[in-house]
Image (cartoon, helix red, strand yellow):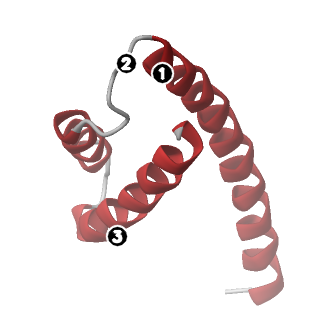
């Protein structure tokens, strides 16, 4: 393994992740506005569970399942903060 090449690949992946998270946050802001206008609670336990399960199902390597669960719980907590 070439450490420098691996780090370059990680940097590229991180850039993609940030771009996708920004898109997700933009949509979350739209959802938050809709929820406020329609008096809908920001927190939806069922939806959050569904999102996490959908992400876990998409894993090719199920050894990472708990990692993905943890990451998505944090993403959703951040998104709830944005919605508020």
Q: Which residue is mark 3?
A: 67
- Residue at 75 percent of width and 88 percent of height: 3
- Residue 50 is tagged as none
Residue 41 in the image, given as x and y percentages of width and height? 32, 30
Q: Which residue is mark 2?
A: 39
Q: Are marks 1 and 2 in contact (CB under 8 Å)?
A: yes
The image quarter in which residue 57 lies: top left
Q: Rounded to the nearest whole Å, what is the CA distance between mark 3 and mark 2?
A: 33 Å
Question: In this picture, is 1 found above or below 44?
Answer: below
Q: Is residue 37 left or right of residue 44?
A: right
State the SS at label 3.
helix
Residue 28 in the image, given as x and y percentages of width and height? 55, 31
Residue closest to the far top:
38
Q: Rounded to the nearest whole Å, what is the CA distance between mark 1 and mark 3?
A: 32 Å
Question: In this picture, is 65 found above or below 35?
Answer: below
- Residue 36 is tagged as 1
Between residue 16 and residue 61, name the one nearer to us. 16
Residue 14 in the image, given as x and y percentages of width and height? 71, 60
Q: Rounded to the nearest whole Å, what is the CA distance between mark 1 and mark 2?
A: 5 Å
- Residue at 83 percent of width and 84 percent of height: 4
- Residue at 59 percent of width and 25 percent of height: 27
- Residue at 35 percent of width and 61 percent of height: 68
Question: In this picture, is 29 found above or below 62?
Answer: above
State the SS at label 2.
loop
């Amino acid at each position: 393994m070439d450490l420098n090449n691996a780090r370059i690949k990680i940097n590229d992946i991180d850039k993609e992740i940030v771009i996708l998270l920004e898109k997700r946050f933009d949509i979350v802001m739209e959802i938050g506005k809709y929820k406020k206008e329609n008096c809908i609670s920001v927190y939806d336990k069922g939806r959050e569970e569904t999102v996490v399960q959908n992400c876990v199902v998409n894993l090719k390597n199920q050894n990472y399942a708990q990692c993905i669960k943890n990451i998505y719980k944090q993403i959703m907590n951040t998104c709830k903060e944005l919605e508020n």
